Image (cartoon, rainbow, N blue to C red):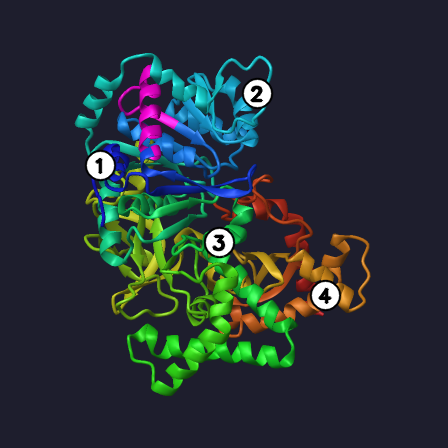
Amino acid sequence: MLNNCHFSRLVYEQARTYGDRTALKFRDYDEGRWKDISWNKFAATARRVSLSLLAYDAAVQENVAVFSQNKPECLFVDFGAYGIRAVTIPFYPTSSAPQIVYMINDARVRFLFVGEQQQYDVALQAIPLCHTLERIVIFDRKVKRQPGDSLSIYFDEFLRVGETGDYDGELNLRQAAASFADTCNILYTSGTTGHSKGVILTYGMYHEALRVNNLALKFDDSDVVLNFLPFTHVFERGWTYWGLAVGAVQAVNLRPADVLQSLREVRPTCMTSVPRFWEKVYQGVQEKIASASPVQAKVMQAALRTGIRAWEDYESKGRRVPPLLALKRKFYDRTVCSVLRKTLGLDRGNFFPTAGALVSREVETFVHAAGIRMIVGYGLTESTATVTCDRPEQPITPGSVGRFVDGLEYKIGANDEILLRGKTITPGYYNKISTTQQVIDADGWFHTGDAGYVKDGELFLKERIKDLFKTSNGKYIAPQAIESKLSVDSYIEQAVVVADRRKFVSALIVPNYALLEAYAKEKGLTYGSREALCDNPRIHEMLQERIDLLQQELANYEKVKHFILLPQPLSIENGELTNTLKVKRAVVYERYKEEIDRLYEEAEKAYTK
């Protein structure tokens, strides 16, 4: 049952309800096992955080920053801060020193909590440029502090600070004064251009978001959630808070690379993810089919065809599956799909929310065919995540992002832009009045920057308006739609479309190097370096054939005619990706300008011959 009280009281009320029942789980890498944290322990630790912050004179609505990968301590600090009406600002664990310098200075942060050695080392680089920073608190005791570092203490030391004085009265006064109008978080968007913006999220916004999500989907204290996306991401943050509010167990995945292992060990009923996770699952199954014996491959393909037909033609439309097809579906589910789900650790699945990018039709239908209930949705940091989502009890059209949540107003504006208004919409950006006025108009409509349309109650996204490209022939190209098609292929890790003011569409492609090398070995292709492999004409021919198959439904002017294979992946470290792995197009285009210009020059020469 949803406990939608103010976050300053949530963990205490849940502790009274659930006591020693497990609230959080995490893998102890030293002991090689998952450990439980009870609601009582959670509440007691959050209270100690509150008292220690008060001992350091943390003010009402003061900004406290958390720079860490997902750890239980992140939640202890969040709810400890909420208990004294402070604001928490999560930083992505992969943030660079210049990024955290900007955010610390913008928000005038005095207290910075860091996770492991990487975040501590980056924080030390930032200290000379952060004049408000007074204290760094380190979660992990294994972090080696630098000689002469007088700003940092370990988390266990921090917790003891509050034991030295009488702060209970102040804590009680602040909790009693807590308001839904207070700022809860400032989430800095990762930003594909320029400095990131601090999105203000109030307690009232979360209160409404939990209410509308609870109306849309069945989620309760019998669920076990794997926290996979960073807590910094509004999708994971909102989802985690909803899970805590209904009493669901939160299994905190500390290292993103270990998610597949964590899935098998935890066997969660729910997990938020981005489409790329399911694309990887889809690719893995396609590779398994390709390497299986003819008989096994035939059975697996028949199982997926049966599941796709049952879901697309009947289940997604709310229609009863015909008896013969239902019988076939049940047989294949028992013999094939259930094995797949168990192998992945998804055999106890309730539902799996997915958002953050376009979900290709192939991937969406595959996931449902495998008996996994994917809930596709759409949201933004500025909307406290969910704007729309699939409703299990209503028809679902592949390619849509679901139906609008209760109480949220919407309309389609100029250039098909989606406009939103309601209690979950941000009041604005921190310290940026003019930027706020650019996106929230005089009537209170938030301009999302996303183009879309509504059909039969479902929202369909078209493209980010600012990302629309116009070729030199006057045709408009939606790069993300093309990129999502290409990313389904197992040989393609990343794709960046090039088209703006060009005569045709091309792409920069980061291949799956392991598969490419295996293919080269199988075909007897020799190469001296990864660069040479990526330049091999036979490799290009093979990939062009695969790309052509993926593009069959596109108009001719939308199709990728030529591409460049990149010998190195795009990365956060090189400034080519944001912390949420979105492509910084301007950076990528500038970095590969010579290669792109040469591709078009050579294509032009070949065309005029």
Residue 263's disc is 3
Q: Kindly report the secondary structure that dominates the magenta region of the rendered protein.
A: helix
The residue that disc 2 covers is 145
Query: x%, y% of residue 419?
Result: 27, 52
- Disc with the residue nearer the chain's start (1 vs 4): 1
User: What is the three-letter code of the residue carrying label 1?
Assistant: His
Q: State yes or no: residue 427 in magenta.
A: no
Q: Which residue corresponds to the image point at 35% horizontal and 19% vertical from the top-left?
A: 52
Asked if residue 47 lies in the magenta stretch, the reply is yes
Q: Is residue 342 left or right of residue 420?
A: right
What secondary structure is found at the residue carrying circle 1?
loop
Pick the front one: 330 or 411: 330
> Which three-letter amino acid code belongs to the residue tagged 4?
Tyr
The residue range painted magenta reads 41-64
- Who comes first in sequence, dot 3 or dot 4? 3
- In this rendering, which labeled residue sits more in front, label 4 or label 2? 2
Q: CA distance from mark 1 to mark 2?
A: 37 Å
Image quadrant assignment for residue 38? top left
The residue at which mark 4 appears reads as 519
Mark 4 secondary-structure assignment: helix
Do callouts 1 and 3 mark residues in contact (Cβ within 8 Å)?
A: no
Residue at the far bottom: name it. 324
Q: Is residue 123 left or right of residue 415?
A: right
